[in-house]
Image (spheres, rainbow, N blue to C red):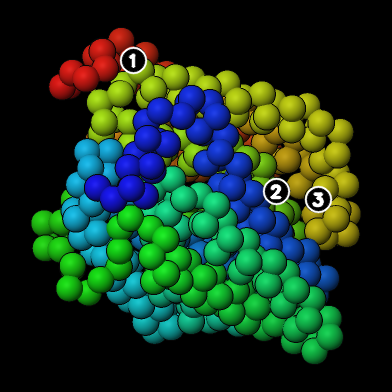
Amino acid sequence: MTETQSAQYRKMTQTPVPRLIVQLGIPTTISMLVTNIYNMADTWFVGQVGTSASGAVGVVFGLMAVIQAFGFMFGHGAGSIISRHLGAKDVGSATRYATTSFFGSFAAGTLIAVLGFAFMDPFMRLLGSTETILPYARTYGACILLGAPFMASSCVLNNILRYEGRAALAMIGLTSGSLLNIFGDWLLMNVFGLEVLGAGISTAVSQLVSFSLLFFMFLSGRTQSKIRPRSMGSVSDLLQICRTGLPSLIRQGMGSVSTMTLNSCARLYGDAAVAAMSIVTRIATFVFSVALGIGQGFQPVSAFNFGARKYSRVRTGYFFTLISSEILLGTVAAVGFFFCGPLVGFFRNDPEVIAIGTTALTAQFVALFFQPLTICSNMLFQSIGHNRVASLLASLRSGLCFLPAVLLLSTVLGLRGIQIAQPVADICAFVITLPFVVRFFRTLPPDGMDL
């Protein structure tokens, strides 16, 4: 190993765990928050056009979730493997997996774009678009599809940087594109009057900028793993990446399916219901990103030290992350209860939208207390390569628990059932996850031993 690589190894295996997670988690949390701020900026700017346009943002959010699902599958899959190889001081294998995941994600993003353009209208309807929302969704979705290859591969570059312990570099790439998107929304929509098209162009351009900055980090030699066409791995390597990243595909994919289902149920109550649930989803995702950012700071620590057989550091990291996330989200929930109405109204000043959204957002804040255990546990099992358990846990919140909840509750309780479906799913996911965590830590061996 070079001196730089040795210094990075010492940092990941000897720095006190709480300090290391904070060092890696703060840039990641900032990245998540800024990324979600630009998503919310789209919601705010488009919301000025009208209720149907505001609903289109929620519809296309499902499309973005599909693209990101594949990007995160390759990114988290490769990142976990790379970090464990670096923990075992195998830099060559790390480069092979980095290259394979990068080209795999770019190909997946390109395929999604081709299929999306070929089946645009049916896809938008599948995502929950009404006939009045469809023109806006079609325009916004076309721009997102053009940026799909870069959006998917940016997820890979970002996650490899994180798993190497270079979260600050990942933050630079993501936040730069996000801030550019907010400025682009204002310029193209307010100055040039392009309305929804302007928001779509701004998002696509920002994704390209983020991709370029993240890719530059690899070209400039700031990473241990490299992106080299000659280092492309075998089909077996690609399949291993996909297996390890499957929980992320499930988590993001289920998020897309849940968005489709939620929009389909909500559209029975009109564009105002679709717009309200879209706004609530964006706000909840923004808050959720706080815990997710801390958890993503924990993932490289977990994977690296698991590969180095320093299991006590994995245990310490998990409980520090869990407690920190619980405190942060609990504080947000306690404050947020008093501002649900104004928050929804900020994005769309429509009395019907505000009334529907306020109830739904209040229920979402209750659910915040149950989310940290599910998030941290899913990230733990994925980072150490326990793919089956991680895949199961990833499918709970937006899939196995949410889909039955929203379909059943909307049938029994109507609109109220739609508003409380996600909190009910979060509670169910918490109950199912807890036994897996208890069993894992009871069987975790002492440092240095094989599992």
Which of the two discs, 3 and 1, labels the residue nearer the N terminus? 3
**Residue mark closest to the camera, 3 vs 1:** 1
Is the residue 303 above or below the residue 289 in the image? above
The reply to whether discs 3 and 2 touch (Cβ–Cβ < 8 Å) is yes
Could you say which quadrant of the image residue 54 lies in?
A: bottom right
List the single residue furthest toward the top. 442
Circle 3 Cα neighbour tier, 10 Å, few/some/many (<14 / 14–19 / ≥20): many
Q: Is residue 426 left or right of residue 194?
A: left
213 or 141, nearer to the observer = 213
**Neighbourhood count class around disc 1 (C-alpha, 10 Å): few under 14, some 14–19, many 20 upward:** few
Q: Earlier in the sequence, mark 1 or mark 2?
A: 2
Using the numbered discs, state the Cα–Cα distance from disc 3 to disc 1 in whole angstroms.
Answer: 41 Å
At x 30% / y 74%, what residue is drawn?
107
Foreground residue among 319 and 222:
222
Going by the numbered disc 2, the residue's amino acid type is Ile
Against 367, residue 167 (above or below) is below
Q: Residue at x 37, y 35 (%)?
A: 10
| Label 2 secondary element | helix
Q: Look at discs 3 and 2 and give the one toward the viewer.
A: 2
Q: Residue at x 34, y 39 (%)?
A: 9
Which numbered disc covers residue 344? 3
Three-letter amino acid code of the residue under disc 3: Val
**Is 50 on the left-hand or right-hand side of 392?**
right
**x then y, percent, for residue 289:** 60, 44
Which label number is shown at residue 441?
1
Could you tell me residue 284's position as x and y percent? 66, 44
Is any part of residue 442 visible from this angle?
yes
Residue 283: which disc? 2
Which quadrant of the figure has residue 290?
top right
